[in-house]
Image (cartoon, rainbow, N blue to C red):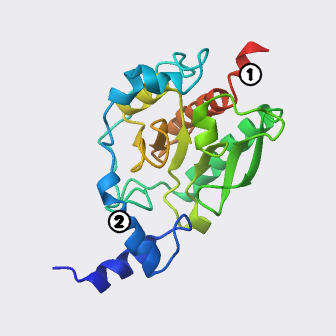
Amino acid sequence: MMGPLTSYHEWLHVADTALPQNMFGYLLQLCLSPLRTQPFTLEPYDNPKEIAKCGQHIGKRNFLPKLPEREGPRPTMLKWMAPHRQADQRSDDAMHELLAEAIDELVVKHAAHVVVRTSVLEKSGEAILIADNIDTPHAIAKQNKREIAHVHTDGGKGDYSLHMCLSPSDCKEVIEKKWGERMTLAGTLVPNNYLLIYTPRTKEEVEIVKTIIEGAIVFMTGARELVQ
């Protein structure tokens, strides 16, 4: 049986900066365990109250095309509440570079509406946020502190999965087609729309993940790209 100290050091080995990287952070994530979400439930995304949080003109819209089903089983996730990371199906440096290039292209494309800054949720690493001159269009954007998406690089040692917010219907599409799952605290400390997207393993998967990120950008900035 794993002792408390062994478990703590195991967590410390994978801990990120979202929580203090010490015993306090370890105990805090243990205390959050009763809040663990059901990772694959679709129920919140048909809830009228949840849809209303996304705004009258946005909540019922989808911003993604129909996605192909992700090949193979879902990755195994680490057992911790935080960090929320993959334990397997990690990608290589070549895929990391392609993912970074894809994100850079999206930031340039949507430069009028987004900005890249240190993640306000992870407290380190870069994230895509709603630009300062753009009003938060719905309660989800406010609750998520304007943060749209970030990649878990963890200084080059991460799994390169992503966290991001999507519209309710897009959340359903992503979960059903096995491209991601709900964040461990979705529906409690973060919005129900807050998903983890699995790291892309091939060039084709990078393109699909790029499409999902763009869906998050358009949803979180109030669909400005579509209505102008």
Using the image, determine if residue 196 lies above or below residue 119. above
- Where residue 87 appears, x then y in whole percent? 36, 60
Numbered-mark total: 2
Using the image, determine if residue 166 lies above or below residue 125. above
At horizontal 35% and vertical 65% (from top left) the residue drawn is 31
- Where residue 131 appears, x then y in whole percent? 79, 39
| Quarter of the figure with residue 34 | bottom left
At horizontal 56% and vertical 68% (from top left) the residue drawn is 17
Q: Give the quadrant of the C terminus.
A: top right
Closest to the observer, 184 or 90: 184
- Residue corresponding to mark 1: 224
Distance, label 2 to label 1, CA atoms, is 40 Å
Labelled pair 2, 1 in contact (Cβ < 8 Å): no
Q: Categorize mark 2 by other alpha carbons within 10 Å: few (<14), some (14-19), many (20+).
A: few
At horizontal 63% and vertical 39% (from top left) the residue drawn is 142
Closest to the observer, 179 or 101: 179
Q: Amino acid at mark 2?
A: Cys
226 left or right, relative to 76 = right
Number of the front mark, 2 or 1? 2
Q: Is residue 226 visible?
A: yes
At horizontal 51% and vertical 76% (from top left) the residue drawn is 21
31 left or right, relative to 202 = left
| Quarter of the figure with residue 164 | top right
Q: Earlier in the sequence, mark 2 or mark 1?
A: 2
- Residue corresponding to mark 2: 31
- Where residue 63 appears, x then y in whole percent? 57, 21
